[in-house]
Image (cartoon, rainbow, N blue to C red):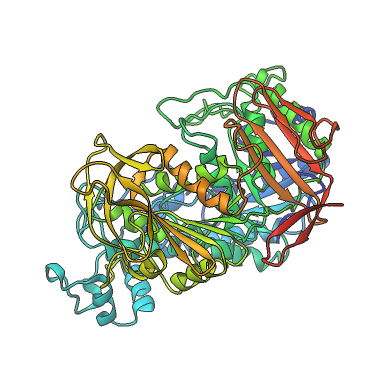
């Protein structure tokens, strides 16, 4: 279930409750100029709509929705439950969170509620229900937006009791729990459920949440907190459904956000949506990875770009401005990777508080002649010309990257072998290599169906669960390629080491044995030779004994010089590769391109390092090729198929020259049709 619209919804977060009527009038005039047709409203209105427990006042929302309808706009209506009103925290102090250090917070901030608080759950769901009862049939309603950017954790007594209940349901008995957590270590064996405490700075941790004595306890608490916050979402969704059975319901996620396992949330979202604020120094593939992760939550169904800044953020120590053209490029990148909406935070700049300097479509002076506003107008005009050409289009990827929150958590809370190894950085390195080689990539959970794929990348997949080894082996036997890396397959779902040679249940597939591993500081570099080239490796150096695999790359220093650092194992008609160390990006590129080349997955523009490509296939079989130029120079390409640029209307034939200016974009509708391949992946053929 996704929202229906004749074109990509364009707009963003709007907070008219902060402004008098005359400002609303000016806002809507400017919205019309910019082509803004969708407003996200009510995100932080709880203290307005419910100023006291037994008083509700929907006057402002009534006016906001009615005015949107009069202007021909649609609304994504939020439940407003992400920030408590002061009266609620005062009357029910248990709704205030207890932090990792054990301190009960007083009222303030946002995301400030305990997910186990009965008072919060009762009042939040009541608010969601009242809103659905009042607005569920309003003609402007496009989607429901529950809460906002769920996150954080609580360690209060209510959460401790809820955690114990969650553990009973998950493990069944204390004997099973003690076995899972390996509690005979350090005399931790539990004999009563009420002996169990949340893992905090007062119990199992030191130097912060990532330094834990018992990884099993911490791993389960992160799973529990994911489920506890998810329970708040599903409770509000159920309250909405009691009055509105049809309008799609979502909440805005945050991409590569470590605290919450979004794969556990995915079945409960009618459509995925997320807020794109990439790290300041991120290459273009970092937001691309997050887009593809969000698309993968719903098995490739398009998502909404719920927030992005039109110019600058405000929450960082340094907040650079988006240069001319960067907003357009970022928006088209999201659409290229599966976005069916392009929304901003925020439409009008707040006058006070912590986001008064956050970028906005309309600044404090309310001007319509600023550079940022002109860029928003121009982009709105492009999206209007595009119409619904990209809506509901899917991505025909034959390469998959396995992404696993359990492995992320387990890797980074482990004592040893190397704390500087960061899951997201390693995953990004392999994703970046595939994307820059021109391959479309699906970022999928470890439980996903692997049959559509020829290549599966599994970097630092620390935990191995269920039947994944068998499914990876089957993919290789039928001719596919599996690529795994160092610190993969080290432990089971409880983070207990396998009682077998490393890499545990993947050892037969990979054809190797790892008896030892060396870890060195970041500044220690080991050379790894592959063919005529040498690459740099850091952090972890696993010492590999082949048991059927052949060496592809070897270490060049220390006592393990000459031993395999990269291996390849023939399995049936396919292959399984293993990279035993943290190669630099050129080294990762070398390995990934060899894997992709075996399946003819190197794209025609792979040599153009600043040109990103992405493909989407519309429901009627039309192929759309996106060309995104991430440099301030000019790129000259050769068309590899006949197509029409949907942004300019220009036609190109195979062999024609294509020119992309600085930070430029082309959306090529290919003069081809799509027919299914026997393997389940799409095949582009000429009409």
Extreme left residue here?
187
Nearer to me, 311 or 70: 311
Relative image position of residue 604 (x, y in whole percent): 66, 40
- Horizontal side of residue 539 vs 673, given as left or right: left
The residue depicted at 80 percent of the width and 53 percent of the height is 685
Relative image position of residue 350 (x, y in whole percent): 56, 29
In this rendering, does residue 49 appear at all?
A: yes
Nearer to me, 27 or 526: 526
Tell me: residue 235, above or below residue 290.
below
The quarter of the displayed image where residue 31 is located: top right
The quarter of the displayed image where residue 35 is located: top right
Tell me: residue 144, above or below residue 647.
below
Nearer to me, 42 or 341: 341
Relative image position of residue 585 (x, y in whole percent): 43, 38
Tell me: residue 231, above or below residue 202.
below
Nearer to me, 288 or 508: 508
In this rendering, does residue 44 appear at all?
A: no
Q: Quadrant of the N terminus?
A: bottom right
The residue depicted at 61 percent of the width and 29 percent of the height is 310
Relative image position of residue 10 (x, y in whole percent): 72, 39
The quarter of the displayed image where residue 342 is located: top right
């Amino acid at each position: 279930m996704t929202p229906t619209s004749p074109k990509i919804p364009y707009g963003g977060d709007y907070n008219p409750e902060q402004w008098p009527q005359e400002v609303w009038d000016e806002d809507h005039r400017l919205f019309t100029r910019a082509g803004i047709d969708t407003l996200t409203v009510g995100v932080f209105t709880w203290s307005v709509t419910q100023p006291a427990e037994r008083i509700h006042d929907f006057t402002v929302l009534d006016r906001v929705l009615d005015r949107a309808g009069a202007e021909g706009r649609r609304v994504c209506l939020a439940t407003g439950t992400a920030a408590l009103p002061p009266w609620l925290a005062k009357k029910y102090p248990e709704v205030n969170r207890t932090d990792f250090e054990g301190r009960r917070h007083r009222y303030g901030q946002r995301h400030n509620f305990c997910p186990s608080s009965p008072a919060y759950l009762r009042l939040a769901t009541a608010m969601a229900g009242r809103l659905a009862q009042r607005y569920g049939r309003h003609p402007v309603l496009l989607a429901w937006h529950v809460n906002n950017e769920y996150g954080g954790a609580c360690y209060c007594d209510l959460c401790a009791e809820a955690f114990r209940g969650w553990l009973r349901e998950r493990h069944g008995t204390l004997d099973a729990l003690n076995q899972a957590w390996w509690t005979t270590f350090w005399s931790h064996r539990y004999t009563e459920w009420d002996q169990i405490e949340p893992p905090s700075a007062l119990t199992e941790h030191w130097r912060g949440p990532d330094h834990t004595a018992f990884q099993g306890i911490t791993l389960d608490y992160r799973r529990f907190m994911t489920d506890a916050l998810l329970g708040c979402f599903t409770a509000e969704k159920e309250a909405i459904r009691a009055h509105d059975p049809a309008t799609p319901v979502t909440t805005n996620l945050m991409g590569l956000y470590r605290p919450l396992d979004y794969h556990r949330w995915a079945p409960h979202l009618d459509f995925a949506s997320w807020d794109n604020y990439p790290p300041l120094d991120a290459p273009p593939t970092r937001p691309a990875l997050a887009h593809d992760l969000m698309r993968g939550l719903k098995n490739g169904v398009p998502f909404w770009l719920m927030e992005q800044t039109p110019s600058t953020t405000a929450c960082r120590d340094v907040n650079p401005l988006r240069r001319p053209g960067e907003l357009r490029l970022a928006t088209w990148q999201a659409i290229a990777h599966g976005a069916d909406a392009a929304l901003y935070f925020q439409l009008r700049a707040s006058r006070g508080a912590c986001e008064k300097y956050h970028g906005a479509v309309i600044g404090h002076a309310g001007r319509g002649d600023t550079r940022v506003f002109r860029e928003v107008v121009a982009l709105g005009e492009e999206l209007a010309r595009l119409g619904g050409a990209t809506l509901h289009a899917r991505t025909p990827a034959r390469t998959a990257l396995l992404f696993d929150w359990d492995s992320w958590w387990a890797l980074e809370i482990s004592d040893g072998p190397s704390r500087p190894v960061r899951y997201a950085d390693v995953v990004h390195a392999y994703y970046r290599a595939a994307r820059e080689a021109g391959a479309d990539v699906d970022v999928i959970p470890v439980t996903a169906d692997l049959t559509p794929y020829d290549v599966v990348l599994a970097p630092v997949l620390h935990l191995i669960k269920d039947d994944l080894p068998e499914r990876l082996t089957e993919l290789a036997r039928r001719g596919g390629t599996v690529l795994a890396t160092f610190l993969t397959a080290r432990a089971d779902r409880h983070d207990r080491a396998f009682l077998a040679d490393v890499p545990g249940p993947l050892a037969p597939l990979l054809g190797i044995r790892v008896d030892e591993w060396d870890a060195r500081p970041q500044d220690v570099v080991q050379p790894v030779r592959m063919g005529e080239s040498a690459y740099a490796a850091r952090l972890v150096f696993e010492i590999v004994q082949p048991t059927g695999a052949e060496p592809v790359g070897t270490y060049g220093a220390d006592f393990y010089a000459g031993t395999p650092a990269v291996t390849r194992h023939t399995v049936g008609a396919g292959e399984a590769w293993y990279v035993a160390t943290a190669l630099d990006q050129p080294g990762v590129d070398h390995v990934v391109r060899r894997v992709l080349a075996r399946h003819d997955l190197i794209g025609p523009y792979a040599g153009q390092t600043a040109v990103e490509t992405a493909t989407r296939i519309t429901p009627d079989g039309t192929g759309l090729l996106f060309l995104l130029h991430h440099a301030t120079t000019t790129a000259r390409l050769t068309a590899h198929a006949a197509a029409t640029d949907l942004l300019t209307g220009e036609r190109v034939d195979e062999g024609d020259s294509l020119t992309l200016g600085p930070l430029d974009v082309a959306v090529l509708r290919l003069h081809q049709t799509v027919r299914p391949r026997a393997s389940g992946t799409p095949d582009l053929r000429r009409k």
